[in-house]
Amino acid sequence: MSSPADTFYALLGVAQQATSGDIRMAYRRRAQKYHPDKYRGRGDAAALMAQLNRAYEVLSDPQQRAAYDRDIAASGAGGRQPPAVPLDLGGKPWYLLWFTLSVILLTLGFVALKALSSPRSGVVNVPPVAAPALPDTNAAAAAIKPWTEPPQRPVPQADDPVARLVRDGVIERPAKRPSP
């Protein structure tokens, strides 16, 4: 154990004198909060859950807990309690935010410098854009004709797949249906 933050007690958020019931409740609370299915996209949830499982395994067994307490006392890591919850920054690294803001500010600064340093030769005159000519509304209304059905085109025999199959002898000519 290199630091107090590495203790199983700190990981579960309980005091070293906690009862087995307190440890069980703290483990269940943390397991629900940091379960990989619910804690997606925010750090390594599987590794954190594995640490929680190992901490509960050791602290729930009285013999393993006594040996663990002896190891903590021997290493001198049991004196102070660190914050129990790992620092959660929402899963987004801060350096990425600072990098993005720096690039934006540098870009804006360079654009401002370029705009201030380039001499302008004068005012640029832009010719006005002519409005499109609108058709005469009375003439357009008179030219509208009612819709008519387009003429039916007969299908040539060469393109008709059924006629080709009948002609080749693959199928027999279908019988005509009697008209009602």
Image (spheres, rainbow, N blue to C red):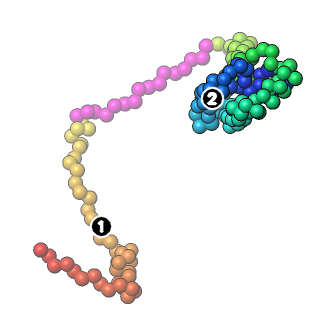
Residue 51 on image: x %, y % = 72, 33
| Left or right, residue 37 beside residue 146 | right
Q: Which residue is mark 2?
A: 24
Whether residue 39 can be seen here: no
Region rendered in magenta = 123-138
The quadrant in which residue 59 appears is top right
Q: Which residue is mark 1?
A: 153
Q: Earlier in the sequence, mark 2 or mark 1?
A: 2
Asked whether disc 2 touches disc 1, contact meaning CB atoms under 8 Å apart, the reply is no
Residue at 44% x, 25% y: name it: 130
Identity of the amino acid at label 2?
Answer: Arg
Residue closest to the eye, 161 or 19: 19
Residue at 84% x, 27% y: name it: 71
Per the image, label 2 sits on a secondary structure element best described as helix
Task: Find the residue positioned furthest to the left.
Answer: 180
Query: How packed is label 2: few (under 14 Cα within 10 Å), some, or many (20 or more)?
Result: some
Task: For marks 2 and 1, give the one nearer the viewer.
Answer: 2
Residue closest to the eye, 169 or 76: 76
